[in-house]
Amino acid sequence: MTNHWVDIKNTDLVLIMGGNAAEAHPCGFKWVTEAKAHRKARLIVVDPRFTRSAAVSDYYAPIRAGSDIAFLGGVINYLLSHDRIHHEYVKNYTDFSFLVKDEFAFNDGIYSGYNPEKRSYDKSTWGYQIGKDGYVVTDPTLQNPRCVYQLMKAHYSRYTPDMVSSICGTPKDAFLKVCELIAETSAANKTMTILYALGWTQHSQGSQMIRTGAMVQLLLGNIGVAGGGMNALRGHSNIQGLTDLGLLSNLLPGYMTLPGDAEQDYKTYVEKRASKPLRPGQMSYWQNYNKFFVSNMKAWWGDAATAQNNWCYDWLPKLDKGYDLLQVFENMNQGKVNGYICQGFNPLASAPCKVKVSGSLAKLKFLVIVDPLATETSEFWQNHGEYNDVDPAKIQTEVFRLPSTCFAEEDGSLVNSGRWLQWHWKAAEPPGDAKGDQEIMAGIFLKIRDLYKKDGGAFPDPILNLTWKHKQPDAPSPEELAKEFSGKALGDVTDPKDKTQVLVKAGDQLNGFPELRDDGSTSCGCWIFAGSWSEKGNLMARRDNSDPFGIGQTLNWAYAWPANRRVLYNRASCDPAGKPYDPSRMLIAWNAEAGKWGGSDIPDFKPDSPPEDGMNPFIMNPEGVARFFAIDKMAEGPFPEHYEPMESPLAVNPMHPKNDKAKSNPAARVFKDDWSSFGTPDRFPYVGTTYRLTEHFHYWTKHVRINAILQPEQFVEIGEELAKEKGIKAGDHVRVKSKRGFIVAVAVVTKRVRTLDVAGKKVHTVGVPIHWGFMGVAKNGYITNTLTPFVGDANTQTPEFKAFLVNIEKV
Amino acid sequence: MQVTRRQFFKICAAGVGSSSLVALGFAPGEALAEVREFKLARTTETRNTCPYCSVGCGILIYSLGDQAKNAHAEVMHIEGDPDHPVNRGTLCPKGAGLLDFVHSPNRLKRPEYRAPGSKEWQPISWDEAYTRIAKLMKEDRDKNFIAKNDKGETVNRWVSTGMLAASASSNETGYLTQKIARSLGMLAFDNQARV
């Protein structure tokens, strides 16, 4: 979230799209209720299902799963063509006036530089015109046809209300009503929040759906303000934190990135990431990359990381490609992976196309499960009848199942969606011989380290030199680890303006990332978490819920990254002169007397930069402004374009009926053998979409008695029209099939899933809740991901669980 | 006399009589006349965070026992933390069932091992498990570690063993896991955020 949960109460309009907060995030959704009750805010829900969020909305619009870019592209067109945008904001704080290279082009759904064999783009034309002074060329009059504003206007002019209605199946009047409500928030003192979740991420074009939402918010001036923002409601309690810490194939902590093979030279690696400003007077905060990086290497390798060895740069693994979950299972399926560790992760249930995942696991030599619960993955080799029909004798994988603690049995911090690092305390001992995850990781690592010490082996240096200064080496404590990622001074840290002033003395915990240095004098395991445990103590454990400004900021509750800021980009809540657009919801303002910014939040800005200096609010971008034109950052193009899901009920993409290359995402990665696993509408005519129920959490609560009682048995939801067509009555057992397999479940026939008119044909949706499996105290069921396709978003490789093709029949 | 529920617990703890009638909906004012102590008053209250979705609701865990070294704490009640700025004491149908997660019959209690081709689990000690896993990992790493690619560039990666990290483990666990994985040269490494 750019903002945070309580901040939702400050909004005028809530758009829930690609999520269902009332059911999936009920206690956060109460702030929507609060905004409705106390600010007269309105709620719009756009969803394929009439969810419980929709049930309490002021306006609901149905949409076909997977067509969100068309809908939002239509909103952009409406805002631009009706001139309902926040002019001062877009002119000053976005790339509206930036000129784009003349070679950049878009032809019938495909951008310049496409290579159809590789399904990827040469992005060299996707950039700005750079002047002789090294800065982007701009046209403040916005008349130049190559300026971002003009290109964007032309691009989205094709998304007419009729086109939107045809692609999305949303009635035209419903679409226009939503546009009108959204457009009201273009006023400087009105705002909208967008709440989304896996309903946007789990598409082959999911990242671009989110981008399109962000573009709508930028046009309206709704980013960086109280009650506004792009708010990702994360699915688990700490996937925000684990992502912040870089536990993804290509990441280092704090959104630093691992080098690729070609980046052999350390200096070039840093320079590429430490971008110089692209406009005069801008901050470009990533210029400090080297300080974050060196401090990280010092945290990991201590004295072994020196200026002479480039702070152990060569010790980091380099990427020849991404090794995301789908790529790894593909490799496993090809017999290229021998060992796998699942720590609190249940891929047999969570990953797409169960038959492929199951077959891949069976090719492993060894599998290690670390979990508090008996997961399906841990018994992938066991015959569980119709739900997991395998022959154990044929599966040669060695499996270890190690019991770990759950939340109640450990100390530590989790990061919620609002970026709050909240500390929690242990209440009891774990059952039996279960151990904490830190102890288990240490147990395995120390044995490996001992073997390398004793016998040597492949490149042992990073293993033998890994910092391990724990009072109990076999049980590193949460306090020690939290202090390590928060960071400390190894030598005296001095003021760069006056070297005689010591800011932090050697050995002390740092107060924040401004104190990080690139000379080896600081150590910090995750720069964005810097200061969460300072000499003042564990700030994540703070419990002062006072709210002096009355807008829910609670700056002394827990610790928010970065720098305890609660609303990101908050400089954009003020006009260029530094005055809040809406003083009643003031986040920060320029105080000319004091010569600094301040208010109800920590400024997301250089704290003493006066407005007349012209520094812009988006300090992480070298441009200083937000981008409508994504330059080379996205896989499939600088402006989001509607593409059909990889499995579409339509024969063509209505935007590009004559160009088959532009039917589905041209940059989506599909493994060779998986093309044949995609179904077509002649055999699988209905749109399948998966989701959560309010009574269950993921694949965990089927192990929990009360939730198993609340929702004991697997079901699917279909509309009345489809039920009638197929002769299915409520309560019948049905078989739902995709090209990859089938599940059997009880049918719920409901008005909440409706049939849509899409591009001249009727499209039915089959809703498939995800929560069942063959382990647990609930009634056994089929794993939903038996049905889903093995393909992901072109940027993130997040699987396309929200739109695929199925058929349904009465059993 | 009007007391809030929280004040009421404090009164109970101070030894003034109270009643389980409160649980049936009687107001504290009337219940003060009773003598039986409310059992939550004799528990230890621990502040924690709901492990399910990302709202990060504050919870209060009540466990039996006074945290004495020889007393085995038993979690017997979990409810929303009324001081928490986001959930203000409320919990959803998932969070309200957390007690049954802690005590799920499917909690794993001891390390287990499944041999190739076997139909069953067998017990294994922690030390044996660590030793065997470390041996398997080292063998694979030593055999398949790629120090240099075909072009002779230094790449120092190990991609024949992978790991999926958790979705609800703490930052401290995540940080340690990240540090260990990268020291081994691991790239086939993701967390639940990927899906």
Image: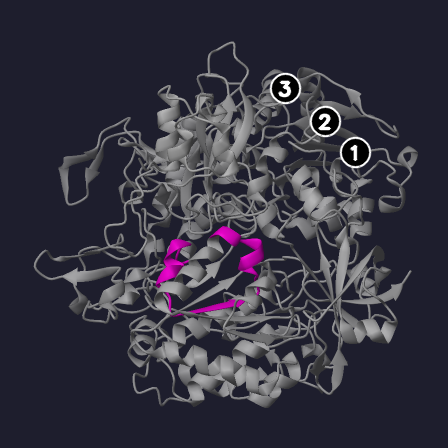
Q: Position of residue A279 (x, y in %)?
A: 30, 69
Disc 3 to disc 1: CB gap under 8 Å = no
Q: Mark 1 falls on what kind of element? A: loop
* Subunit that carries the residue with mark 2: B
Residue A429 in percent (x, y) is at 55, 21
Could you tell me which quadrant the N terminus of chain A lies in? bottom left
Residue at image point 77% right, 56% down: A715
Q: Which residue appears farthest toward the top when viewing the image?
A: B70
Using the numbered discs, state the Cα–Cα distance from disc 3 to disc 1 in whole angstroms: 20 Å
Magenta range: A2-27
Of circles 2 and 3, which is in front? 2
In the rendered image, which quarter contains the C terminus of chain A?
bottom right
Badge 3 density bin: few <14, some 14–19, many ≥20, Cα 10 Å: some
Q: Residue at x 75, y 54 (%)?
A: A785
> Which residue in the structure is indicated by mark 1?
A365
| Residue A103 visible | no
Above or below: residue B181 compared with residue A172: above
Give the mark nearest the N terminus, 3 or 1: 1
Q: Amino acid under label 1?
A: Lys
Residue denoted by label 2: B136
Q: Nearer the viewer, residue A142 or A90?
A: A90
- What amino acid is labelled 2 in the image? Leu
Disc 1 to disc 2, how far (Cα)?
A: 9 Å
Instruction: Judge depth for marks 3 and 1 and give the one in front.
Output: 1
* Residue that mark 3 sits on: A451
Q: Is residue A368 above or below residue A451?
A: below
Task: Check contact, mark 1 vs mark 2: CB within 8 A.
Answer: yes
Calculate the distance from the C-alpha at mark 2 to the C-alpha at mark 3.
11 Å
Q: Is residue A29 above or below residue B36?
A: below
